[in-house]
Amino acid sequence: MSLAFLISIFIFVVTFILIFTEKIHRTVIASVGAVVMVSFGMLYNFYNSEQALAAIDFNTIGLLLGMMIIVAILEKTGFFQYLAIVAAKKTKGDPWKLVVVLGLVTTLVSLILDNVTTVVLIAPVTIIIVRLLKISPIPILIAEALLSNTGGVATLVGDPPNIMIGSAANFSFNDFLTHTAPIVFIAWIVTLLVLKFVFRKEMTQKPENIHELEKMDERKALKDVKTLKKVGIVLALVVVLFFVHSQIHMPPSMVALIGASLALILVAPTKDPQKILEKVEWSVLGFFAALFVIVGGLEHAGVLEQLAYAISNLARGDIVIAALAILWISAIMSAIIDNIPFTVAMIPVIGYLETQGIPVNLLWWALALGVGFGGNGTPIGSTANIVVVAKSEQTDTPITFRSWLKSGSITMVSTLIVASIAIFFFADYLGQETAGQKIYNQDVAKHEISIKH
Amino acid sequence: MCKMIKDVMRKAYTINVNKTFIEALDIMTKEQTNSILVLDDDGKLVGMINTGMLIRAIVPDYLEDDIVAAHFANQDIFREDIKKAKDLEISNFMLKNPQKVKENSNLMEVSIMALSSKQFRVPVVDGNDRPVGLITRTELRRVFADVLGIGDL
């Protein structure tokens, strides 16, 4: 074992432990870890700054940046609150119907848009609605987080791990719709049933002041209809482009950046977009970039190759068992630690397994389902969970760790069982080359031919 | 000669940090003042409350950045939230470690502090951090009038 090998592992392990213990902010420690990795890489000749730059997946960063800009413009229009009120009024204040419709709205919005922003904007108006009705906010707030986490696994842009996995495996937007979405649909229904069971007592609460709910005028929520219409057009275009991005040979990041540029020129053509750009979560983007650089160091030192080699025999033995192992391990990991660093570290390992001649598609889908569903397990499992718990703190019934565990952990286990059954019975289908990959591989082949000529 | 801080400062009302929302509100109402300085058990300045802080204590955190949701909170919800704030400890909503000046500091420094949107009022403390007075924008305006010979109001 070479010195480079040991040094890179040491830097990786120390940085990741510090990230998971959350004593130092994750972006700060990841940046430090990244520069230390590159510096030692140059000193011991296993990694340099150009390789570090190449290790950053700009497709992931670009996609997130583009969507963040669109959301930054959209969130001030009051559109999220408008949707919540429209949906809530249809329920006549019935607690169970509120769980279903507000959970549904949150899920549908977060299929395309960032689910943290969605929850941040829908939770306060939810609390106001339940206070008017004098019912408990807990089931509805938890439902919004759990259902949007579960739903997020259905699309390429639903949550950051999917973006990263899609980018690494060359899965298209439609690949997610034809592979994870059907599983997610069942898991989403199961989540709803779990909520109904766990909160059966709260569901019998009789709402008061239903007239107060019906009096709410959703149009009053719309603060800027002009901007909303413009962003609406942009979003419609973005969704259409997502559906065809693979066929027109356009990476998803390009779609998001087209949307963002279009939104900027439609909404604020003459103004400095500084105010909008300040809303972009640069800290998150920096964190992701730094993680790619750190894991890149590990990759160039040959560590991941060795690791993949070590587990390749296991995967070769039975790919379904390997997929189930990835599903459950990644779910448990993502329930207790930040799922992004875990995903970034897992991606090159699965990538190397592919070079060993192992058909890895089933493993990619297992990873996406695992990190996605695992986020429901604890109040810290996903950022959306942290948000609803924080928002509930000043209500009469704050969400406690226990009340989360009893709903979230059952949800996590039941949705994982759904995913396990799907992996077990549809292993062949999930393991096949996807439509998006076929187009990508043809493009690569064409490109290679044109270089030869 | 231009007046000094100690010539213009007004009386500062104080309250112990362990007291509650309603006790602070009581002093502010009875003494008709918009700010109280908060002291620890040794009588040292640790914070300040003004009317803005009282409003912050009433408004639930989840509504602070959400004017849209707040639009739908009716009269009953507002009354409920006021009642909820009643026994809140001052340390939960006071402005912690406010900017402060000494008696012999210059008035330009106070002016800069009074311009900041967070803190219109500046506590004056002695060498041991014990409050001796308070400067507000009104005192500064009086100094302007004095310098330009308009006379004291």
Image: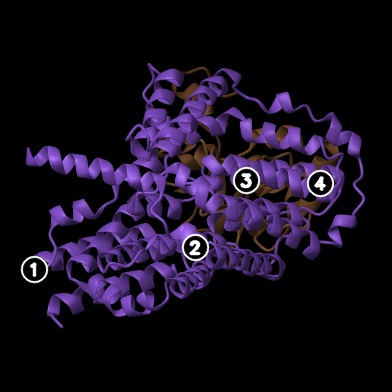
Chain colours: A purple, B brown
Query: In the image, is B4 to the left or to the right of A56?
Result: right
Give the mark nearer the N terminus: 3 vs 2: 3
- Dot 4 corresponds to which residue? A97
Give the mark nearer the N terminus: 4 vs 1: 1
Type of residue at label 1?
Leu
Residue A124 lies, in percent from the top left, at: 68, 44
The C terminus of chain B: image quadrant: top right
Residue at 38% over, 39% down? A252
Question: Which element type, helix, strand or loop, lies under badge 4?
Answer: helix
Which one is nearer the viewer's eye here, A286 or A93? A93
Give the mark nearer the N terminus: 1 vs 3: 1
Task: Mark yes or no: residue A278 visible.
Answer: no
Type of residue at label 2?
Val
- Dot 2 corresponds to which residue? A371
Residue at 90% over, 54% down? A205
Query: In the image, is A305 to the left or to the right of A288?
Result: left
Q: Chain of mark 3?
A: A
- Dot 1 corresponds to which residue? A43
Which one is nearer the viewer's eye here, A425 or A165? A425
Count residues near mark 2 (Cα–Cα under 10 Å), then give few for <14, some for 14-19, many for 20+.
Answer: many
Give the mark nearer the N terminus: 3 vs 4: 4
Give the mark nearer the N terminus: 4 vs 2: 4
Residue B15 lies, in percent from the top left, at: 67, 56
| Distance of label 1 from label 3 (alpha carbons) | 48 Å
Residue A107 - label: 3
| Distance of label 4 from label 1 (alpha carbons) | 62 Å
Marks 3, 4 in one chain: yes
Count residues near mark 3 (Cα–Cα under 10 Å), then give few for <14, some for 14-19, many for 20+.
Answer: many
Residue A184 lies, in percent from the top left, at: 59, 54
Does the residue at mark 4 contact the one at mark 2 (Cβ under 8 Å)? no
Q: Chain of mark 4?
A: A
